[in-house]
Amino acid sequence: MAKLWDKGFDNDAKIDAFTVGMDRELDLQLAPCDIMGTMAHITMLSSVGLLPKDDLNKLLPELKSLYRSACNGDFVIEDDVEDVHSQVELMLTRKLGDLGKKVHTGRSRNDQVLVDLKLFSRAALMKTVGKVKRLFDLLQTRSEECKDILIPGYTHLQVAMPSSFGLWFGAYAESLTADMSVLKAAWEVTNRNPLGSAAGYGSSAPLDRTMTTRLLGFADLDYNVVYAQMGRGKTERIIASAYGAVAETLGRLAFDCCMYASQNFGFIHLPDRMTTGSSIMPHKKNPDVFELVRAHCNRISGIQNTIRLITTNLPSGYFRDMQLIKEVFIPMFKEMDDCLDITAYAVERMEVEKDIMDDPKYRLAFTVEEVNRLVAEGVPFRDAYRQVGIAVQNGEFEYSGTLHHTHEGSIGNLCNDKISERMDSLMAEFGFEQVKEAVRRLTEQD
């Protein structure tokens, strides 16, 4: 089959196979986005007089039909077709003849893939943000449920001071608010329209880029056409960095869960059905779910560096190097979403031990409580510190008081309501409804 860039000679089969790479497989996931971008583009072409209204009225129903097919998983990129852009144009031409060849006016495959990746990433971000919020809500719920259950806090993996499950669950909830701020920044970069930058230098066609921005529900434009092309790789790296932030939170939580579930700690327990066994040791109940979350999250954290290595030192303009970014970028979204889902599933069902601090080995966690008690009685801090230290050295330290942690964010004052307010404020700033409404208007059947 002739390619979009066909000039009348056959391409070398080995070169063709190598340069196409995994595009056909990965582009299937971009197909709804490519079709949606084409609908917006030809609607704009008609408005500026480059496509007769009658032609638009014939093209749009076919594109909407293709869009539904792609959303349902029925869209196929044929073996001898180079990519999704070629397949869409081929199917339109088969159905409508030469009319199908008009949809590429004022475009390059360069800005097509740019807008495809932006639309794909935007939809994926919306999904991930929802899953982060679900895990946040669960951690907040568990924090409130367990706020009075004490556990030892550690520094250097040595028993340090009293903590609580409320403080522990709540810490990871607040960490997700920081991650949500980073996701919000990635969303702002993603939600800008590159369509109309063509091959990276614009077009002499009188394109209305503001119109396609509105039709596709973007918040704004990538204005400079050279920058729009430079945004390929940069946008993916920014998104991958945001996903790396979420992955860091999940990976750290997973490590804690692996450690706390071990016999040496015994702070938490997974239901037997959620653990795995050993082929040789009959007693084993392994927290493989958290070990794999940790490994997946480590891999996700490295994606931004892989993208950086692909794009480092490239000059302005488009280069085929960018194609390889898809191979690490597109699968990232599902990998992250799967980790969020399974973490929420496990955290919701894990059981916590209630009398951990009754064990004498944790009594030294209360040394600072005793120091502060003495200080409250008028003993200078340094003297109180030394007095308690000597008692510890002599094996004479005991503590039987109650905890009085009242400041913001401490055991007795978790401030979960304030943390929830911060998360709610962040969620309100995304503007998902505007995007969903634009997509609905563009793609719905007449």
Image (tube, grey):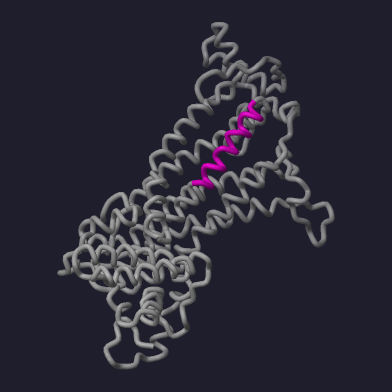
Residue at 44%, 55% in the rendered image? 123
Residue 305 shown left or right of residue 285 in the figure: left
Percent x, y for residue 150?
67, 27
Residue span colored magenta: 130-147
Q: Nearer the viewer, residue 359 or 347?
A: 347
Tally of numbered discs: 0
Residue at 58%, 55% in the rendered image? 338
SS assignment for the magenta stretch, majority? helix
Q: Nearer the viewer, residue 236 or 27?
A: 27
Inspect this view and state whether residue 102 appears.
yes
Q: Nearer the viewer, residue 137 or 91?
A: 91
Percent x, y for residue 439?
39, 55
Q: Is residue 16 above or below residue 309?
A: below
Query: Hey, which quadrant is residue 314 in on the image?
Result: bottom left
Percent x, y for residue 82?
40, 80
**Residue 84 on the magenta segment:** no
Query: Hey, which quadrant is residue 307 in on the image?
Result: bottom left
